[in-house]
Structure formats: C-alpha cells, structure tokens
Amino acid sequence: MSAEQSPKIVIVDESPVRAAILEDGLREAGFTEIVHIREMQSLLARIYAVDPDIILIDLENPSRDVLEAMFQVSRAVKRPIAMFVDQSDTSSIQASVEAGVSAYIVDGLKKERIKPILDLCVSRFNAFAKLQEELERTKSQLEDRKIIEKAKGILMKVKGLTEDEAYVLLRSTAMREKKKIGEIAQSIITASEMLK
Amino acid sequence: MTAPLRIGFIPLVDAAALIVAVDRGFTAAEGLDVELVREVSWSNVRDKLNIGLFDAAHLLAPVAIASSLGLGHVKVPIAAPFNLGINGNAITVSPSLHAALIEEIDGDRFDPLTTAKALARVVAIRRKAGAEPLTFGMTFPFSTHNYQLRFWMAAAGVDPDEDVRLVVLPPPYMVDSLANGHVDAFCVGAPWNSVAVDLGIGHILHFVSDILERAAEKVLAVRQVWSDKHPDVVASLVRAAVKGAEFIEQPANLAEVAQILAQPERIGVDADVIQRSLTGRLKTSPDGAVRESGRYLLVGREGAGRPDPVQAAWLYAQMVRWGQTALSPEALKTAMAVFRPDLYDAAVGRVGEGQASAPFSAFAGPAFDPSDLAGYLASFEVGRSAF
C-alpha cells in the first residue's frame, strides 16, 4: 500500500466463513480498515455509522436491494454511491456477478484503487464456491455410501445373499440400467418400504 | 427446441403468468426450453439480465425503464413485450398505526384522500410529541411501491422525504420488520400483505387499486438487442405467457394454479394465501374482516398483458417528480419505448389492429397527459422535480 490511507471496507455477508476468507485476503493485500456486518436489520444505519469507502455484499443476500437506496440522494446517506465502472467496463460487473459478489463504491475513490480490491473479491468468492462444491460432493458421497449399505442389508435379508453378492447385484443392475449405484440402492429402499 | 432460456424471477404472485407458462407446459408447447431461476433481489435480477446471465426476467416495470435510461446502474436498453401484472400491491400498517389512523379518519376509510389526510394528522401529532418519524417499507428505489406510497401520502401534503422515512426492504423481510417495529407500514405485492394479516401484526389499509385504477406492476423484460436478434423466441415467449395468464384467469383452474405457485422452488408460501391474492378476496384485518375487489391484481383480464406506453410515461413522471432524474423529452420517449405493444401484437397476431390505451386514472392530481409532463408535474405541491 502507498502512503495513502487504506480505504475503509465494509463486508456485508451472512456467511461468517466466506466473510473471513475475504477479510483475510484483503488484509494480506494490505487493507487494514475492514468491518464485517452480519446483522441485516437497519443495514443502512449500520453502514452509515461506519461511513465506508467500499461496500462488498454477496449476491445471495436479499439486502442487496437495500444498498441500492444509497444511489439516491437522501438523508440516510452521508456520501452518495458512485458507479465505479464506465459504461464500457462491463467485464468487471460480469466477473463479479458470476462470482456472486457486488461492490458499491462511494464517490471519490480512485478507479485504480478499486480494481485490485474487486479482483481479490472475485477470486476469493470463486475459491469459496469451489470449497463449498467439494464439501457438497463429499457429503453426497457419504450419503450414497449410507444408502448402499442399507440396500445391501435389504438384499442380504430378502434374497439370502452375502454382502459381496449383494454389492455385485447392485452394481451390475446399475450398469445394465445405466444408472448410478446410489439410485438403484435408493429404489430398493423405497420399494422395500412400500412392501412393508 | 431452441437453445435453453434462463429466466429470472422474484417469488411474488405477479410472476404467476410466467411460472404457469413454464410449469403447465405452455413454453414447451411453443418449442421453448425454459429454466426458471428464483432470485433474492431486484438488483440481482437486473444485473443478471443486463449481462446476459438471464435471457428474460420478471422485472419491476420502473426498473426496466431505469435500466434503459441508465439510472442507478449501467445503461442497458430493455424491451417489455408482455405485462405480467396490473396492480397487486397493498399498503399494510401496524396495529398501532392503524389505531392512530382510525382515530383521525374523517369520512370513508377506503378513500385514499381521507386516509392520507388522517396520516398527515398522525404525522403532525407525532412531531409535536417529539416522536420518531413514521417509517414506511418499500421494495426498491425504482419501484411502483415507492411511487404509490409517495403519490398517496403527498396528496394530503405529507412529504415522503421530509415528514416520514421511506426505506427499502426485501419483500420476504417486510413482515418481520413490521412485527419488530422496524417499520410502521409497508407497500408490497402479494402474498406478503396477507401473510402479515394472518400473523395478526398488520392491517391492510389500501389496495393499490384504490390509489391508481390501473398500474403496470411487473413486466416480462428482455434486452432490446436480444429481442431484435431473436424476434421468434420473443414471440413464442409472449404467446406462452398469454396462455399462462389466460389459464390463471379461469376460475376452474384456481386451485391448480395456487398449487403450482405454492411449490417451494416457486413462491413457496401456502396455496391458500396465494389463492386469496389471485381472487382479490383478502382478509384485511386480524379480526377476520374481508375485502373483495376485482381490481386487486389483474393478470390476464382487461387486456392486462398488453404493455401500455402511457403507463411507462407515468412511471417516468414519478422518477422526475421525486428527483431521481431530470425531465427530458428524449428520456420520456426512451421510457415509453420500453413498453412494446407492437411485439405483443405481433406475437398474438393482432398486427395493425391498434388498441387505444386505457385512460390513466388516479385518486388525486389532474388527468395524466404524457404530452405535457411539465404541466402535470407542476400541479403537485409536494415533489422535487427539476425542470
């Protein structure tokens, strides 16, 4: 960072993990003035009290519409929000919307100081999304394993198979029907519940 | 089938024509492969439409105009070939504000001028007592809700920027905010007014149809360049929406429509509440009082689906009246050109028939004349127009 004062950044995000990931990134990059707002009640008043230069908000947050009121001249807003992009610079908007984050810049902040913050936001949000995706995948794999165990148990009991035979039957059926083994297992569980 | 279309919407009853068109197979019958994407904010819908993540969207009519004028955000010309809803909003007040208003009401409590005058007196009493100004929730700076609240209270001299506070709240937060006293009243679309009444924390003071007889609420919006490039897809989309709207307006289909809309990935509230909004038979007070109006929400009937540029002009006039933009003949022209009855007519095969727009009728102010906006705006005492 230059001798210029670090801009004051507010992160509005109900996800503490994602906010922490973003805040870490910003601190590493030398931004020191960061406030995380997690409570959406009276959001504008909270922001007003902090008086930030930049506000970052995740797009899953319905309160994003509340921030749009800052474009309006009103008593609720100390300094009006300015568009940081030129009409021609839609790629910045595109990248941030796709990553799931939006930035509101208070009038007067220089454009070259905004770009690195925005880039960092986009990369951190993308990293978080990837993390979450992996988590989901692991979760569904675990879920699948549980379902397969249960279906195996049913087959062993009803058809008098060994555990290995039950698994082979599940797998060969899945291959023949061109379905996932978890789906076949689920239909066995559903069927056995209906026949109870 | 054409390339898959992604269409964004906000979970509100006035997305009905679009949702039914997709879920009841009218879009598929037109050869369209549509994925509906539920969104959480109007800003998201606007941005995703603007940058092409959405091909079309359920959009606040004023946002379509603001986007075309470059107000509040990047300038992206929008075309609205179908009007998804006329009216549908209501003003709901907290029990304590309701009691205060009833105390001050002198005359017909369904007459907006009477209630606005009562509000003016309540505001004066509160000021004298040194109480905090009343806070009204609405959904977006460029929203019908914002303009309808302002139009109503200003008719009795209440300055919406000086005498009360207007705050933006996402529709799903309205009810909580009223319950915990964060706002004293709100203007929002269905089903949220009914939800507040059911919870016993709100009274519906007005249907918006009390204030404006016919107010364009949401449109089916596409980017103008996209519309120019894909006229056939736009026409198919309009026809499917028309069929959806016609299906909704058949009383025999009511229960099925409410069921479709109630799905968690659509609006996600009780089918019963949705059904009430569609029939215009609403419980208005926690004590069980019911009010019925054939004008509460118009989805397909009375030509509701055909975009009316006069409506766009009125919305633009509100932007000028409340200082969101300056008056300019070019901007008025741009605003009116957002509403595209020509695309609607082409889609349904009524080319050249030429329908006159319905007269614009409001409870206050002079007759609305788009060709003399300056004269129209000058007649209002309260406002901050610059011209």
Image: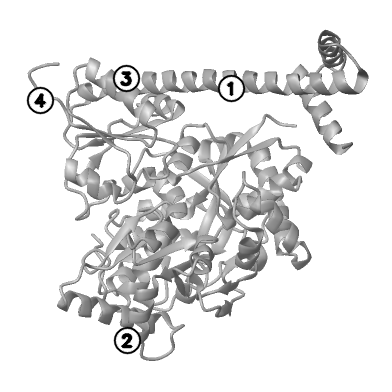
Q: Are marks 1 and 2 on the same chain?
A: no
Q: Amino acid at mark 2?
A: Glu
- Residue name at image x 22 percent, y 69 percent: B163
Q: Residue furthest bottom?
A: B107
Q: Earlier in the sequence, mark 1 or mark 4?
A: 4
Q: CA distance from mark 1 to mark 4?
A: 44 Å
Q: Please tell me whether mark 1 or mark 4 is closer to you in this view.
A: 1
- Residue name at image x 85 percent, y 11 percent: A162
Local crowd size for mark 2, using a 10 Å CA cut-off: few (<14), some (14–19), many (≥20): some
Residue B297: name its quadrant.
Answer: bottom right
> Which chain is indicated by disc 4?
A
- Residue name at image x 30 percent, y 57 percent: B327
Q: Secondary structure at mark 2?
A: helix
- Coloring scheme used: one colour
Q: Amino acid at mark 4?
A: Gln
Above or below A193: residue A70: below
Q: Which residue is mark 3?
A: A120
* Residue B56 or residue A52, whichever sits in front: A52
Q: CA distance from mark 3 to mark 2?
A: 56 Å
Q: Which residue is mark 1?
A: A139
Q: Please tell me whether mark 3 or mark 1 is closer to you in this view.
A: 1
Residue A96: name its quadrant.
Answer: top left
Using the image, tell me which numbered label, if any, was put on residue B104. 2
Q: Are marks 3 and 4 on the same chain?
A: yes
Local crowd size for mark 4, using a 10 Å CA cut-off: few (<14), some (14–19), many (≥20): few
Q: Which residue is mark 4?
A: A5
> Which chain is indicated by disc 3?
A
